[in-house]
Image (cartoon, rainbow, N blue to C red):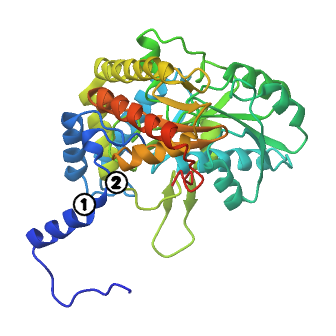
């Protein structure tokens, strides 16, 4: 039945009670029961993100003349991101509403720059493990996507991508890391290919952009993946993931100002005066910008390094302790994501048993595996998770059940 607007308003106490009732069936992410959708770095970080958002919740970044504070905070956030990702001095960037918008704008800039150069190209080549946001962008922008099977190590197969490059190839894509497996694609090899063929290389670091730099500072053996690789033309990196900001905050970075110029929309052919926007949105929530700025300054390098250390150690512990259970991790993940499968049981059935115990996580279909995106909060519940995993495995092995009724869903 369709809802209708009530004739009379309700007081906040009653509304809050109803909202909490609505949320009774939601996953208890604050207690570390979710390994997808939410990145929980602790109550103190959550409070900073929330309070900063509330402080600027009504301000609108569409109007930098009215709200120069938001312009300043965005510029500082972008500057910090460019610095972390080894961008050259002429690099530019903006905050966006999320990874999908960042990727959309990167594809749009690539298309428009190619058109300005007289190139008739409309094809994006990417590994099968790349995010669906590229397909979404291509659908909106009238482009084509070709997904290339990954190599045996589950990373981008550069040789196969090279064989697919043709005169209509517009963009190559690598992930740092990809979402399904948590693996960093061979960006240096993709860079060499992009430079040799004269095509744009975008690195999707939506997950790793604000994690990998700090993991590397902590000693993690990570391959080059950012602007220090010369063929990388653009990067997307989400602040509302491992940047721990409030939802609605990502960044898109360009190697140079000329490239970034294709992202800017300007219009002056109507009665209300000139309008210039750097992203797809008109109104841009000030709270998202303020939250990202506040959390980045609250944590600083030392704070982010500590959060990265906790997450990496938790991932290493889970990897180590599931091996004796007859489970195996896919590939060689080195950040905060992992996917694990089994040979003797249907891992989707195990996922179902874990879900009934209150654990929310993702699934991978190629090959079938349980997907975990770890946050600092998971360090406190690793013991409970592993204990329940042992129980779920024992039950599935005893019953021989299948997970044929379990459907993998990213959203």
- Given residues 190 and 400, the one toward you in this image is 400
Contact, mark 2 vs mark 1 (Cβ under 8 Å): no
Image coordinates for residue 60, horizontal then vertical, percent: 33, 58
- Direction from residue 320 to residue 169 in the image, left or right: right
Residue that mark 1 sits on: 24
Q: Residue at x 55, y 15 (%)?
A: 222
* Residue 37 visible in image: no
Image coordinates for residue 182, horizontal then vertical, percent: 55, 30
- Which is more foreground, mark 2 or mark 1? 1
10 Å crowding of disc 1: few (<14), some (14-19), many (20+): few
Image coordinates for residue 24, horizontal then vertical, percent: 24, 60
Q: Which residue lies furthest to the top in this view?
A: 219
Earlier sequence position, callout 2 versus callout 1: 1
Q: Which residue is drawn at 33% across and 40% down?
A: 245
* Residue 152 visible in image: yes
Q: Residue furthest front?
A: 398
Report which quarter residue 124 is drawn in: top right
Image coordinates for residue 320, horizontal then vertical, percent: 45, 17
Residue that mark 2 sits on: 65
């Amino acid at each position: 039945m369709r809802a209708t607007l009530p004739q009379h308003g309700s007081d906040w106490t009653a509304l809050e009670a109803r909202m909490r009732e609505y949320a009774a069936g939601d996953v208890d992410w604050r207690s570390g029961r979710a390994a997808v959708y939410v990145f929980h770095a602790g109550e103190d970080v959550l409070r900073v993100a929330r309070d900063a958002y509330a402080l600027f919740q009504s301000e609108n970044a569409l109007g930098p003349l009215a709200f120069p504070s938001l312009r300043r905070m965005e510029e500082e956030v972008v500057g910090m991101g460019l610095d972390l990702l080894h961008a050259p001095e002429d690099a530019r960037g903006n905050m966006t509403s999320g990874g999908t918008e960042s990727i959309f704008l990167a594809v749009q800039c690539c298309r428009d720059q190619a058109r300005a150069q007289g190139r008739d190209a409309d094809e994006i080549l990417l590994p099968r493990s790349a995010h669906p946001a590229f397909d979404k962008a291509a659908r909106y922008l009238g482009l084509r996507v070709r997904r290339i099977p990954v190599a045996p190590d589950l990373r981008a197969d550069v040789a196969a991508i090279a064989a697919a490059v043709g005169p209509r190839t517009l963009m190559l894509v690598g992930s740092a890391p990809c979402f399904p497996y948590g693996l960093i694609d061979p960006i240096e090899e993709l860079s060499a290919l992009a430079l040799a063929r004269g095509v744009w290389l975008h690195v999707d670091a939506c997950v790793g952009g604000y994690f990998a730099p700090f993991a590397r500072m902590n000693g993690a053996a990570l391959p080059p993946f950012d602007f220090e690789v010369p063929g990388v033309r653009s990067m997307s990196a989400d602040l509302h993931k491992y940047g721990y900001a409030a939802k609605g905050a990502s960044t898109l970075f360009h190697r140079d100002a000329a490239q970034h110029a294709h992202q800017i929309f300007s219009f002056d052919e109507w009665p209300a005066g000139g309008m210039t926007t750097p992203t797809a949105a008109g109104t841009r929530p000030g709270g998202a910008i303020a939250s990202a700025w506040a959390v980045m300054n609250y944590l600083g390098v030392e704070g982010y390094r500590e959060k990265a250390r906790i997450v990496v150690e938790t991932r290493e512990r889970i990897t180590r302790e599931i091996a004796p259970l007859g489970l195996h991790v896919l590939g060689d993940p080195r950040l905060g994501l992992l996917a694990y499968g089994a040979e003797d049981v249907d891992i989707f059935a195990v996922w179902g048993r874990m879900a009934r115990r209150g654990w929310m996580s993702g699934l991978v279909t190629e090959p079938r595996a349980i997907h975990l995106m770890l946050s600092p909060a998971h360090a406190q519940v690793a013991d409970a998770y592993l204990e329940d995993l042992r129980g779920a495995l024992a039950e599935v092995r005893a019953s021989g059940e299948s997970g044929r009724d379990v459907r993998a869903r990213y959203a």
